Image (cartoon, rainbow, N blue to C red):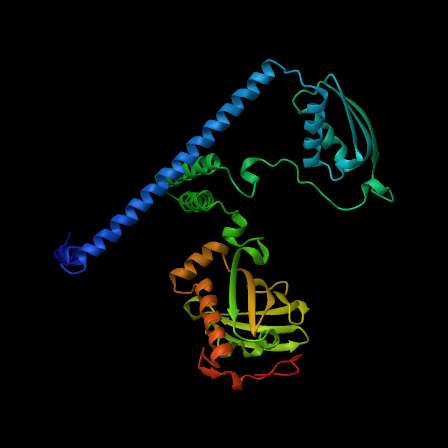
Amino acid sequence: MTRAGWAIGGVGLGAGLMYWADPRSGRVRRAHVREKALHLLHGVRSAFEVVRRDMSHRARGLLYRGRVKLHPEDVDDVTLEARVRSAMGRVCSHPGAIQVACRHGQVELKGPILASESKRVLACVRRVRGVREIDDDLEVHEHAGHHPDLQGDATRPGSRPELLQRSWSPTARFLVGLGSVGLLGYGLSRGGKAAPVLGGVSLLLGLRSLTNLELKRLTGVGAGPEALTFHKDITLRAPVNEVFAFWQAMHNFPRFMSHVEEVEVTGEGHSRWKVRGPAGIVFEWDAVITRLDPGRVLAWKSVEGSMVENAGIIHFEDLGEGRTRLDIRLSYNPPAGLIGHAFAKLLGADPKKQMDDDLLRLKSLMELGKATGHETVSRDELVPGRGVETWVY
């Protein structure tokens, strides 16, 4: 190491010692770090205990299944029928249309069924513990047609492998996490062109196991507008008709929302948004109102193909005495999903904090008559929007 490197390292070490050994604030800082470390250690211990219990239960389950296969159990007819109906409910869209009769391990199935489901239902019933023989008297129909028992669309996904489920078990998360670490080590040891690919795969698997969120929500690919969801309640000292009229006049939002650059009303129920994101990047999209119940509900979503898919719904509740409660649910899919959201937070753009700040400005504007967004604005300066007949203050 050069002299400059040693000098920089010495300065850094000295600054660190001064920070932690400061006679006035050093004790508080050290205590804070110690508490954080203890909290992290407690969380890790709790997580390992959950994994241990889950592994223990699964091992006992596998042992019991193996024992049952070696020594088939005698199941009474009532229990077997309940097992068969439970199994069919996972793979059959109309299980109520099928009559089930059990007698000493022999299962008789009668009733209408769709051709696309018949083989799957028979295979599922055959795997039920206690079933020895199946008497297939099912009426197979290519289409539901006008058959009364096959009406309605109630497709069942069936049993899915562990790693294809939306939420993973603690054991699966633990094993995949270990696998991602091993894959990362293998990629680093090999080097070359394969290293970045293996590193990226191990990163995604590691994040999937740590967060227990689907890959489509992490990456934003195929997640629609619901990759990230926020929920907020707020009570305003203002009549419900005024609050609803305010939200309906969307072109006024930039006056108090610091991250919204412009909202242009392009037609009845349609608008175009310009929002400033991380690093000053401006995102644009078109939105349409999907539900409008005056004084009660306002819902919207971005149109298909928008740069940032998003949706939201606001429920307005009249609390009486000139007070209104807002129940706000917002969801959006940022570029790169939750991974992109994490990077945006590192760059200082946190949508959740922005929403909280904007709602505080809204409360100030509705109750005190003044708020600050891009500029200080009073309620009298706001312009009623399309569909707002009166503004009464």
Q: Quadrant of residue 104?
A: top right
Left or right: 1 with respect to 311? left
Instruction: Pick whichever, 346 or 325, lies toward us.
Output: 325
Residue 35 in the image, given as x and y percentages of width and height: 28, 49
Image x and y of residue 96, in percent: 77, 36
Residue 67, image quadrant = top right
Q: Is residue 185 above or below residue 103?
A: below
Of residue 239 and residue 244, the one placed in the foreground of this image is 239
Splitting the image into 4 quarters, where does residue 86 fall? top right
- Residue in view at x 15 percent, y 58 percent: 22
Please state the total of marks drawn on the protein image: 0
Q: Is residue 296 left or right of residue 18?
A: right
Q: Residue at x 47, y 32 (%)?
A: 54
Q: Is residue 354 above or below residue 189?
A: below
Where does the image place residue 89, in percent across and percent down from the top left? 70, 35
Residue 277 in picture, x, y percent from top left = 46, 68
Given the current orientation, which residue lies at the most extreme right position? 146
Outermost residue to the top: 71
Front position in the image: 372 or 258: 372
From this view, report whether residue 218 is shown above or below residue 298: above
Give the residue displayed 55% in from the left and 67% down from the top.
Answer: 325
Residue lying farthest front? Answer: 321
Q: Is residue 336 left or right of residue 8?
A: right
Residue 257 in view here: no
Q: Residue at x 57, y 73 (%)?
A: 321
Let me know if residue 173 appears in the view.
yes
On screen, residue 129 above or below 332 = above
Query: Which quarter of the figure is the C terminus placed in?
Result: bottom right
